[in-house]
Amino acid sequence: MRFTSTVDRVLAMWLAGVLTAVIIALASLALINRLVYGPEGQVRAYFAAVREGDGSKALGILGAQVPEADASMLDGHALRASLEGVHQLQTTDTVVRDGGERATVTVSYQVNDQRHSSEFNLHKVGSHWGVFDQWAIDQGTLPTVHVDAKALSAATLNGQKVAVKGGSQDFAVTFPGVYQVTYESALYSSVSDSTLITAPGEAPALTLDLEPSPTAVASVRQQVKTYLDTCAAQNSLYPTGCPFEYAFNGRVAGDLTWLITEYPEPEINLANGAWSLSESQGKAEISFTALDLYTGKKEQVNQEVIFEVAGSLVTADETVTFTPAT
């Protein structure tokens, strides 16, 4: 009796252990099925491919059609950059419906301190080895971003230089993602413009508002300074081709000198591709010895002269040239 009871206990413990192992295995399979092979797993795999810059894999998982647009944003650094401004990305809701054949996964994330979300619709397409569910994201058409670059033929979109034919171009993009357009050259700077894409079908526009670059502004002001210094070097009451002069009817004894005491800082304007220079004010000081022809008396003259500089600007290649008004 005691022997039989011991065998029964051992058998019962063995059966309990087997049952526990089966339950753990089934739970593990269910967890793997939900997290790895379920609809959430497919969405996570898509984001992993985007972060790796693997455009072929990402588009294969997304199952989206590429519209008639430039594909520069769909691979490599540009693709990875689309998620650089997307933070705290997480799955917040998964709804399975139609008898377990369809699902919607909602992903939330933060962009510029604001919460946003995107939805991914999926359908079941079979199973792996008859155990794990196989899901696919519903096929759709990728969103696009339209770039208006004015008269430029190129721009920088998400850190990558891209061609902008005729000043405007559509780019196919993935979602969710942040897209920023900028431009910088020796002549031009731009105020960057950015947009957030959250779903297929979106087609926002990004516009480059061009302005003279700091390099161009510095170049023009240096040219103006050089021009005025050349004028100030002339030993004349009326320097030739210059914006300042001093009317004096008497006789100048010896040389006279001009000194620019305040250089003008003209504003460089850019409108519809045309460059212009605003009139700006400066100050000069003339110094000379005046001779009275009747008495022979000499008197030192130091006089401030206020003047204005005006002129035109012409660009060629990567340079801007100032031509003073005469």
Image: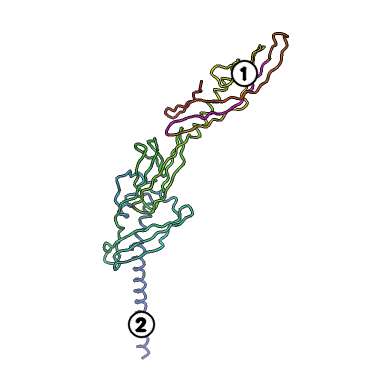
On whether residue 276 falls in the magenta region, the answer is: yes
Label 2: few (<14), some (14–19) or many (≥20) C-alpha neighbours in 10 Å: few
- Compared with residue 85, is residue 103 higher up or lower down, i.e. above or below? below
Colouring mode (rainbow / by chain / secondary structure / one colour): rainbow
Q: Position of residue 136 (x, y in %)?
A: 30, 59
Residue 143 shown left or right of residue 265 in the figure: left
Label number found at residue 246: 1
Q: Mark 2 points at which residue?
A: 12
Of 131 and 51, the residue lying toward us: 51
- Compared with residue 245, is residue 98 higher up or lower down, i.e. above or below? below
Label number found at residue 92: none
Residue 253 shown left or right of residue 84 in the figure: right
User: Which amino acid is tagged 2?
Assistant: Ala
On whether residue 146 falls in the magenta region, the answer is: no
User: Which amino acid is tagged 1?
Assistant: Tyr
Callout 2: SS: helix
| Predominant SS of the magenta segment | strand
Mark closer to the observer (1, 2): 1
Callout 1: SS: loop
Of pointers 1 and 2, the one earlier in the residue sequence: 2
Q: Position of residue 264 (x, y in %)?
A: 57, 28
Label 1: few (<14), some (14–19) or many (≥20) C-alpha neighbours in 10 Å: some
Q: How many labels does the image show?
A: 2
Q: Quadrant of residue 127?
A: bottom left
Residue 219 shown left or right of residue 9 in the figure: right
Residue 126 shown left or right of residue 77 in the figure: left
Q: In which quarter of the image is the N terminus?
A: bottom left
Q: Position of residue 105 (x, y in %)?
A: 36, 61
Q: How far apart are marks 1 and 2 (CA)?
A: 118 Å
Of 55 and 285, the residue lying toward us: 285
**Span of residues in magenta:** 272-288
